[in-house]
Amino acid sequence: MAIDENAFIRLNYTGKVKETGEVFDTTFEDVAEEAGINNPEKEYHPMVLAVGSSQLIPKLNEEIKKLDVGDKASVVIEAEDAFGKRDPSKIQLVPMKEFKKQDVKPFVGMPLTYDGQRGIVRTVDGGRVRVDFNHELAGKDIVYDLEIVEEIEDNVEKILGLIEVYYGNPNLNFDDIDIEIEDGIAKINLGLLAGFEQRSAQEITLSKFRVAKETYDNIDEVDKVQFIEEFEDKVQEQSEESEEEEIPEVLNEDEE
């Protein structure tokens, strides 16, 4: 029986370039270490996937829908259905003065963001820098090794999985995240650390929007998502605790 369109699953995968076998992404830490792509800030475990969502490239989603829980498969995604063909128009010359404005010295292989586009420096020649804004895997056929670990039934677990995928704050303590679903509303409190991020307000808002959209698009019991901000005055809290600890001592002295 194939996986339902609106199902949430835990998925193990390893993505490789078909021609070279080079691993570019995986949910297995040992595979990442062997490939030299281990990220110490990433938790390596099966990812939570809303099957009908836009988390993965469409062709890969189609292949996953053909599988069932417990299945393993290797699928080949051709370049045009993966990260697209290479587009020569996306290779642009950026004046060196643009880098000097930011006090940046460009070098070959340097990743950057320019005019909202992510690219990589290919050449540095005098006053011009050639930047490639194609996806790094553009023009390459891809192989995905897949394993459908389990289907997730609990709605809170589903939302927690979406937070991990889309919110991406390495400081989040998932034990502190509180999620309540009532009357079609999912109320999400990400905890104290979520309020002290080194990201722009625009990035944080976009991350929350992605979590919200995938939640109400793929969970029938949820029509609206609310994020609750929480802050505490730790100094005040500790002071009050200290005063409470001192009070019994004074009373005891009086009683003596």
Image: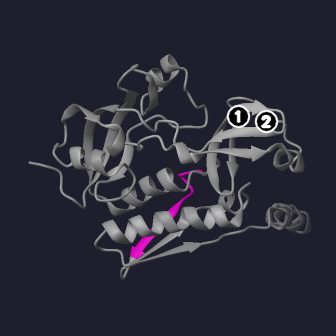
| Above or below for 124 versus 256 | above
> Residue 171's spot in the image, x, y percent?
65, 48
Identify the secondary structure beneath mark 1.
Answer: loop
Answer whether residue 174 is magenta in the image: yes
| Above or below for 37 versus 53 | above
Identify the secondary structure beneath mark 2.
Answer: loop
> Residue 151's spot in the image, x, y percent?
25, 49
- Judge by depth and name the residue closer to the eye, 38 or 89: 89
Point out the stretch of residues depicted in magenta.
173-181
> Residue 114's spot in the image, x, y percent?
70, 52
Identify which amino acid the numbered label 2 is placed on.
Answer: Pro
Are the two marked residues, 1 and 2, in contact with CB atoms closer than 8 angstroms? yes
Answer whether residue 153 is magenta in the image: no
Query: Which residue is identified by label 2?
Result: 106
> Hey, which quadrant is residue 31 in on the image?
top left
> Residue 126's spot in the image, x, y percent?
83, 33
* Residue under the image location 86 percent in, 47 percent down: 97
Query: Which residue is identified by label 1?
Result: 110
Horizontally, is 180 left or right of 50 in the view? right
Identify which amino acid the numbered label 1 is placed on.
Answer: Met
> Where is the C terminus found, in terms of image quarters?
bottom right
